[in-house]
Image: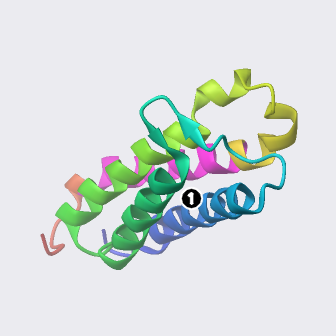
Amino acid sequence: MQDPTTFRAAIAILAILQTVMLGALFAGVPPHPPVQVAPFGIGPFLGASLAICAAAWMLASRRRPALLLGGAAIVAALVSFGPQKYFDPQFPLIWPAVLIAQAAIATLLVQLVALPRTRGVPA
């Protein structure tokens, strides 16, 4: 990745949206995510997602870490902002965040597909 600016911008979008979700959860301001879903609590999951985003931001100029952490950030973001949200009863309230997050995810996917083809980038 010659210039990681686009990658970092998409990561920043996901981190900001997840931070807002976490703040809404703590404050109890609707619409907020549920406190818990079947496999885990949302607070710890959002914390882990933010940690992945922070690491991806810091290592964006390194090819292998960017691939791994960018992919992990995509998977984590899809839990909160994936296509299943179109069927969420709160979608009329959360659609701006869902659409912006999905645009960031698409941008990351394009960046990650192009990344392995980039030559001369430190591993």
Q: Where's the N terminus, which quadrant?
A: bottom left
Q: Relative to 120, is 46 on the left or the right?
A: right
Q: Is residue 37 magenta?
A: no
* Of residues 105 and 30, the one drawn nearer to the viewer in this rendering: 30
Q: Residue furthest top?
A: 87
In percent of width and height, residue 102 lies at 60, 43
Q: Position of residue 9 (x, y in %)?
A: 54, 69
- Give the residue number, with chain letter if any, for mark 1: 14
Magenta span: predominant SS is helix
State the image coordinates of residue 40 (x, y, percent, origin top left).
44, 40
Q: Is residue 100 left or right of residue 28?
A: left
Residue at 12% in and 69% down: 123
Amino acid found under the numbered disc labelled 1: Leu
Q: Position of residue 8 (x, y in %)?
A: 47, 70
Q: Which residues are magenta?
A: 99-115
Pick the front one: 53 or 9: 53
Q: Residue at x 65, y 59 (%)?
A: 17
Q: Residue at x 62, y 65 (%)?
A: 19
Above or below for 51 versus 80: below
Q: Relative to 20, does residue 97 appear above or below in the rendering?
A: above
Magenta highlight on residue 114? yes
Q: Residue at the spot x=80%, y=25% of the render? A: 89
Q: Using a 10 Å C-alpha cutoff, classify the residue at mark 1 as few (fewer than 14 neighbours), some (14 to 19) or many (20 or more).
A: many
Badge 1 marks a residue whose secondary structure is helix
